[in-house]
Image (cartoon, helix red, strand yellow):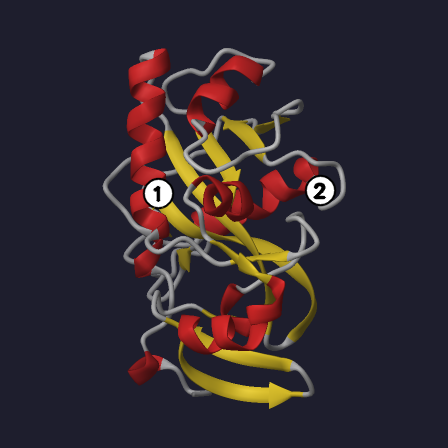
Amino acid sequence: MSELRVVPIAGLPEIGVDHDIAEEIVAHSPISLADGDVIVVTQKIVSKAEGRLVPAAERDSAIASESVRILRRSGGMRISETRHGFVCANAGVDASNVPEDQLALLPVDPDASARRLRSRFEHLAGVDVGVIVSDTFGRAWRLGQTDVAIGVAGIDPFVDHRGSHDSYGRELTATRICAADELAGAAELVMGKTEGIAAAVIRGARVPRGRGAAAEIPRAPADDLFR
């Protein structure tokens, strides 16, 4: 029987532009990183390190510039499709966990951000790890938010059961688990939204290693029955 361990990384300093996130995680992790670990890092500190902050007064223009189209509007909230293909509130423009006069934008290329972090972990600690950049999204048909993967490196975001058989011998034809999203959600349980913990180490995750990307996760508009 497999066991999953999720370890929060507390004590990270306030992250600023060009801050070495991987170096801080290696220094502050309560466990030594090992091959096969998956490191989950919040989008917010990645955006801060990459300088993806704008003045709060520019909220409307930031949402417009980060959106390729607006799908729905409700009061001051918009459901946008971003250039990454994500469908989310206000194109990911967010005021939480940033200075009061600023807003954070999503990284320009979250998968590239994850790849850079993975390479940096290998250089600093000599380990082959997976990296997930996570963010908090709402869900169209369910209340409450959950963290999902917006950047992935070193793992396949999916565990594909298609072609295998269930316990009754029936062939599975559609079951494709988005393990990257599940790991992002698991990490959020130990990081929280108010504790100031922005990274976690996941050990024991049974996910395929590979050159996957979070860009593979959003459903294509042609396959989306609700757009």
Where residue 227 sits, quadrant-wise, is: bottom left
Can you say whether 85 is above or below 111 in the image? below
Q: Residue at x 36, y 26 (%)?
A: 129
Q: Residue at x 55, y 47 (%)?
A: 44
Closer to us: 59 or 218: 59
Q: Which residue is mark 1?
A: 113
Residue 140 vs residue 175: left or right? right
Q: Is residue 94 visible?
A: yes
Q: Residue furthest left?
A: 211
Q: Position of residue 89 (x, y in %)?
A: 57, 72
Where residue 66 sits, quadrant-wise, is: bottom left
Residue 223 vs residue 27: left or right? left
Residue 192: mark in rendering:
2
Give the SS element for disc 1.
helix
Residue 227: mark in rendering:
none
Amino acid carrying mark 1 in the image: Ser
Closer to us: 162 or 29: 29
Residue 8 vs residue 86: left or right? right
Can you say whether 38 is above or below 161 in the image? above
Mark 2: few/some/many CA within 10 Å (<14, 14-19, 20+): few
Q: Are marks 1 and 2 in contact (CB under 8 Å)?
A: no
Q: Residue at x 48, y 87 (%)?
A: 71
Where residue 55 sits, quadrant-wise, is: bottom right
Q: Position of residue 170 (x, y in %)?
A: 38, 61
Can you say whether 62 is above or below 216 in the image? below
Q: Position of residue 108 (x, y in %)?
A: 35, 56
Give the SS element for disc 2.
loop
Q: Position of residue 201 (x, y in %)?
A: 53, 27
Among the two numbered marks 1 and 2 on one chain, the one whose residue lies closer to the N terminus: 1
Amino acid carrying mark 2 in the image: Gly
Q: Residue at x 38, y 24 (%)?
A: 36
Can you say whether 16 is above or below 227 in the image? above
